[in-house]
Image: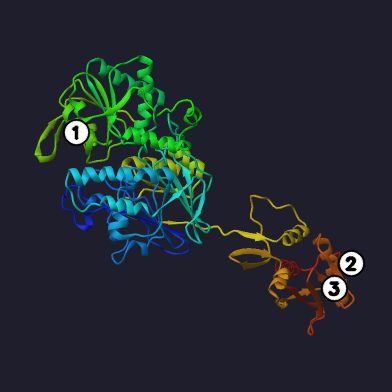
Amino acid sequence: MQHKIQSLTQDSNHTSPSRAERFHPKLLTLQAHANQPRSVEGAGQDVGRSCILVSIGGKNIMLDCGMHMGYNDDRRFPDFSYITQNGRLTDFLDCVIISHFHLDHCGALPYMSEMVGYDGPIYMTHPTKAICPILLEDFRKITVDKKGETNFFTSQMIKDCMKKVIPLNLHQTVQVDDELEIKAYYAGHVLGAAMVHIKVGSESVVYTGDYNMTPDRHLGAAWIDKCRPDILISESTYATTIRDSKRCRERDFLKKVHETIERGGKVLIPVFALGRAQELCILLETFWERMNLKAPIYFSTGLTEKANHYYKLFITWTNQKIRKTFVQRNMFEFKHIKAFDRSYADNPGPMVVFATPGMLHAGQSLQIFKKWAGNEKNMVIMPGYCVQGTIGHKILNGQRKLEMEGRATLDVKLQVEYMSFSAHADAKGIMQLIRMAEPRNMVLVHGEAVKMEFLKGKIEQEFSIDCYMPANGETITVTTNPSVPVDISLNLLKREMALGGPLPDPKKPRTMHGTLIMKENSLKLVSSEQALKELGLNEHQLRFTCRVQLQDPHSDPDTLHRIYTHLKSVLKGYTIQHLPDGTVMVESIVIKVSSSAEDTNTKVLLLSWSYQDEDLGSFLSTLLKKGLPSGLC
């Protein structure tokens, strides 16, 4: 089986990108005994805009269809012309699978299905199907209605796209067609996030999407079967990070928020609508209750209600504690956290505001940041990863003068803190997942090159498997050996055991002779007699013959008897007969003796055997060429 991964780079310095500068879907192809292209169209040594095409056993599956939050031009969407320049994508894709609702994994979906053209099935979990269109519409409003951008999908396109979605249940095997099957596993990360196991015949791939191996205040930890896929494609956002204690992180977060409030400052926490927002809201709600604090906490208008609705609806996707206490108390109905109105940003006095989106690249969080950035009393806490090009990424890298729209400059005087409440697996979690799934090969995506290189070395050293980290624009090839399951008939096994000898070592291979029959796409190894019977064929005898010259002064009958005696002493456990017709038989092997016409002391031995006893026949011919031992009667 050959696997190739290819992706193409883009130049972030150009504002009017050519086709070659746009990012391109990763294509990862699996095909037994054939060379097939695999390409990556995003998240190759880069975080975000995940879009991977897997070709396995002749089936083409797109994994995620994300957009890049750091671009405002054509580069934010994948360039699907690298899959096909002629015709709709429907002709080339068997299905599309979306791992979760974050826009860097689903943001280009309406563009792909409605503007490029794809009418096939799109699979995602029930929570993702419910939440995805809301986030897509929110982003469309910011991009089109507020910024006035064109070449963007419409509200109707989002609705038409979602009509093509088929919801997945966890641990449910879904037959996409007669050969392709997929199965979703719990990934933690955000509500509804799933890892997916894709299988065609004996070939398989696991795609993790984004996942978290550590349970938190509202979600459980990711889990998968020991499915031993040919390739595990894993995110590697925190490839070199081993996080400190979650309890210590929470304590530092609460301390910084409390200190800022005490000195009369305002705290901005940019978050995405669902996920870390709920995690930190639960944390602050509990702290405010315990400390009896009066400073207001606000959350972006409308999103709290939507979040509550979906967490109630999909309570089975939360962690065990929330599921147990849900009947007595809904953890998502907050007493201290109120809906935010944009006029509140100018209110005097301390406050805490959760605002979307999480990377300060647009929307309400960016508007509040502009208002509060000039006051050193204030603080912005970035609780998750920020991709390159966003305001969040710039301020985390120490930039204190920001060029905003219209060439205006913004001085950043407020305190900037990064506290990772990100729901991505760290290096320890990635290694834990590899131990869980036991893949034959590893592919790292959705990470930064230097960090991925470090983790790649660790994986290869600890697990002795090949690990790849394709960049955008790079093609890699992975060769694997598919295992073909074969049933063995009970009669054949019994016959092998009846031949005697030591019991087979389970760790060592053992040769078995039989006939391989294919029936209804399954293989079975049976005895030749059973095969003839099942197929209604007549048996043809094939025998091998061999001549051996032997020096022996005795008469032909005496020589034959001496051979019989010698073989009886050497071959224990075999049926050896001296027959009245002047032959010796060992199993199916017949031995005859005649004298040479020129020299009566030179005996010519004729050995004949069937193909079943080929090994034994070869052994006897070699043995008799050495001559008979002296002293034989």
Q: Quadrant of residue 53?
A: bottom left
The answer to which of 303 and 458 lies nearer the viewer is: 303
Q: Amino acid at mark 1?
A: Gln
Give the farthest residue toward the bottom.
597
Where does the image place residue 182, in percent across and percent down from the top left? 48, 53
Q: Earlier in the sequence, mark 3 or mark 2?
A: 3
Judging by the rendered image, the residue that carries numbered circle 1 is 367
Q: CA distance from mark 3 to mark 2?
A: 11 Å
Judging by the rendered image, the residue that carries numbered circle 2 is 633
Q: Nearer the viewer, mark 2 or mark 1?
A: 1
Q: Earlier in the sequence, mark 1 or mark 3?
A: 1
Q: Amino acid at mark 3?
A: Leu
Side of 376 where 624 appears, left or right: right
Judging by the rendered image, the residue that carries numbered circle 3 is 560
Q: Secondary structure at mark 2?
A: loop
Q: CA distance from mark 2 to mark 1?
A: 109 Å
Give the residue drawn at x 24%, y 53%.
Answer: 22
Q: Nearer the viewer, mark 1 or mark 3?
A: 1
Q: Secondary structure at mark 1?
A: helix
Say if 407 sits above or below 16 in the image: above
Where does the image place residue 274, in percent across and percent down from the top left? 35, 36
Q: Secondary structure at mark 3?
A: helix
Side of 42 where 331 appears, left or right: right
Q: Quadrant of the C terminus?
A: bottom right
Dot 1 and dot 3 residues touching (CB under 8 Å): no
